[in-house]
Amino acid sequence: GAGVSQSPSNKVTEKGKDVELRCDPISGHTALYWYRQRLGQGLEFLIYFQGNSAPDKSGLPSDRFSAERTGESVSTLTIQRTQQEDSAVYLCASSLVVDRGEQYFGPGTRLTVT
Amino acid sequence: DAKTTQPTSMDCAEGRAANLPCNHSTISGNEYVYWYRQIHSQGPQYIIHGLKNNETNEMASLIITEDRKSSTLILPHATLRDTAVYYCIVREESGGSNYKLTFGKGTLLTVNP
């Protein structure tokens, strides 16, 4: 497809379980970003990738969160031992290069931790 | 710590122009003005950006004042599908932590039939 895709679109999980969220960026985009949006709140930056390198992980809320990227392709955001406060929409975006140009967002994954 | 100020909400009649203001009085010389919007339950969508000249694309026009302390996003013929939260973002084009888009609270534009 032409845009950023994310899967699953919705995920309901029990507290304490691990979840994996996937992002497929636009082909040719070297930069990839993860954001989180809690209900009624603004976007919170989590992490970005330049290629498969993540220069800034400071936005990750805790060590239960990790992310990786394969080359300049798919990225996965993993949340271990999920907590109810992890419930949010997780948004992925990509851009042609990291520090120029606009970011194109995917539809997000709505995570609900029960 | 958004560097922009926008009205909380605005209304517009369908078919009319929607003019969304943004104040960015502390903008520096190498910072661009970006506009995104977020339709309910969707990811943010890039609209337009500019440095100091007015810009136009298929979605909107961006008017930046000469002193660059404020700007206006213009949707020339608003439709019901333009109902969304519109975010004005100031961002350095390169360097620093410009990779993070810092979204403020934005303006909820409601287009009425």
Image: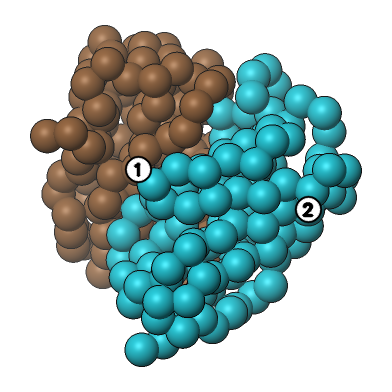
Q: Residue at x 45, y 43 (%)?
A: B57
The furthest residue to the left? A1
Q: Residue at x 52, y 71 (%)?
A: B17
Label 2: how many residues lie within 10 Å, few (<14), some (14-19) or many (20+)? some
The quarter of the rendered structure image containing the C terminus of chain B is bottom left
Q: Amino acid at mark 2?
A: Ser
The chain ID associated with circle 1 is A
**Mark 1 highlights which residue?**
A105
**Mark 2 highlights which residue?**
B70
Q: Position of residue A91 (x, y in %)?
A: 35, 47
Q: Amino acid at mark 1?
A: Phe
Label 1: how many residues lie within 10 Å, few (<14), some (14-19) or many (20+)? many
Query: Picture quarter containing residue B38?
Result: bottom left
The chain ID associated with circle 2 is B
Task: Give the chain coloured cyan.
Answer: B
| Cα gap from disc 2 to disc 1, whole angstroms | 26 Å
Q: Residue at x 63, y 37 (%)?
A: B50
